[in-house]
Image: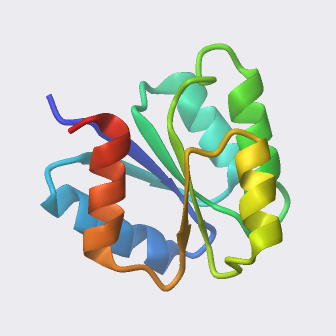
């Protein structure tokens, strides 16, 4: 059974692109637009890894990550943060909240696949 990856990005085109890349690498993919939708998806569906955008309206990636980590059912799900703002402060904040990795946009498709596989042990 393929590993299940949830893509969370408020830009639908980024979600579609990441979905194509990860499906091509053999992963099962779901994509949602925003933190609230991500939390709802995680509560309803088994997920092995989350690719989470940082900058989103309403519920940003940092707050979404905090809520993922405080929920027992999702506390250990690997979360890879995606952002166009790859500054040291954002990276430090993401790590302090429990992010497993940090990927800067624009991203290299092969690098995304490699990092997802590494976190899933695939």
Q: Residue at x 32, y 69 (%)?
A: 111
Q: Whole-percent x and y of residue 72?
A: 67, 14
Q: In the figure, is residue 35 to the left or right of 20?
A: right
The image shows residue 7, relative to residue 104, as above or below, that is: above
Residue at the far top in the pictured view = 72
**Above or below, comparing residue 120 to residue 73 in the picture:** below
Q: Is residue 69 left or right of residue 110?
A: right
Q: Quadrant of residue 115?
A: bottom left
Residue 21, position as x, y percentages in the image: 25, 68
Above or below: residue 96 compared with residue 47: below
Rendering coords of residue 42 (x, y %): 56, 31
Q: Residue 48 lies in what quarter of the image?
A: top left
Q: Is residue 104 left or right of residue 114?
A: right
Q: Work out whether residue 12 or residue 23 is closer to the camera in this orientation and state it.
A: 23
The one nearer the camera, 57 or 76, is 76
Quadrant (top left, top right, bottom left, bottom right) of the C terminus: top left
Q: Position of residue 76 (x, y in %)?
A: 56, 24
The residue at the point 82 percent across, 47 percent down is 63
Q: Farthest residue to the bottom: give it.
A: 106
Q: Residue at 55% across / 36% down in the picture?
A: 41
Residue 14 appearing in the image: yes
- Which of the 4 image quarters holds residue 75? top right
Question: Is residue 60 in view from this perspective?
Answer: no
Viewer-closest of 12 and 113: 113
The reply, left or right, for residue 101 in relation to residue 122 is right
Give the quadrant of the N terminus.
Answer: top left
């Amino acid at each position: 059974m393929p590993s299940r990856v949830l893509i969370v990005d408020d830009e639908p085109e980024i979600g579609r692109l990441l979905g194509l890349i990860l499906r091509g690498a053999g992963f099962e993919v779901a994509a949602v637009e925003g933190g609230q939708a991500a939390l709802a998806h995680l509560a309803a569906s088994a997920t092995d890894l989350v690719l989470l955008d940082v900058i989103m309206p309403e519920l940003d990636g940092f707050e979404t990550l905090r809520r993922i980590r405080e929920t027992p059912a999702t506390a250990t799900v690997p979360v890879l943060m995606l952002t166009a703002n790859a500054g040291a402060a954002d990276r430090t904040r993401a790590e302090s909240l429990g992010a497993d990795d940090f990927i800067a946009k624009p991203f290299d498709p092969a690098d995304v696949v490699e990092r997802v596989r590494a976190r899933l042990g695939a």
